[in-house]
Amino acid sequence: LAGMDKQKIKQTFFQMFFSKSGNNHGIAKDVKKLFPQTIDYIKQIKNEDKNTKGYFAILLQRLESYFILEKVCKRLHREHPKAPIFTKHDSVYTIEEFRLELLKIMQEESIALFGGSPTFRLC
């Protein structure tokens, strides 16, 4: 992972999260050195048992929707009831007047829920 740009790291993790177990494009060893427990958890969740197949992807999707809908949108609505809110997958849209407030809420809720805040893109 050393020397990889942010986009390449993101792509690598998505390949690991959403591909079959063992199909990690040769990077699992590098990732395991940096995040040993994370790889073990991913392997446990992604085992090939038909009862749990695809569970990890579903888990990530549910976490994403919980963050966007239950945390970010509800808080924006609570603090700014007149702000229009639109969502599409992992994106939240509002009008210019509430744009910076939305960004602030996303950052704060991300820190509270995940312990850190990624870079959010303003469009």
Image (cartoon, rainbow, N blue to C red):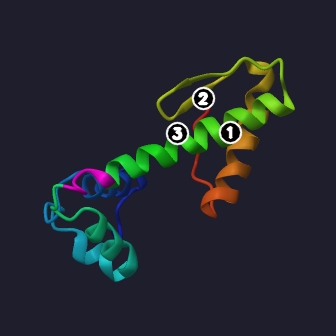
Q: Amino acid at mark 2?
A: Val
Residue extent of the magenta highlight: 51-55
Separation of marks 2 and 3 at Cα, in angstroms: 11 Å
- Horizontal and vertical percent for residue 82? 83, 17
Label 2 SS:
strand
Label 1 SS:
helix
Q: Amino acid at mark 3?
A: Ser
Quarter assignment of residue 13: bottom left
Left or right placement of residue 114 versus residue 84 in this view: left
Q: Quadrant of the N terminus?
A: bottom left
- The numbered mark, 1 or 2, whose residue comes first in the sequence reads 1
Q: Which of these two is toward me, 31 or 64?
A: 64
What residue sits right under mark 3 in the picture? 65
Q: Is residue 9 above or below residue 65?
A: below
Separation of marks 1 and 2 at Cα, in angstroms: 9 Å
Residue at x-position 56% and y-position 25%: 87
Separation of marks 3 and 1 at Cα, in angstroms: 10 Å
Q: Is residue 83 magenta?
A: no
Q: Which mark is residue 72?
A: 1
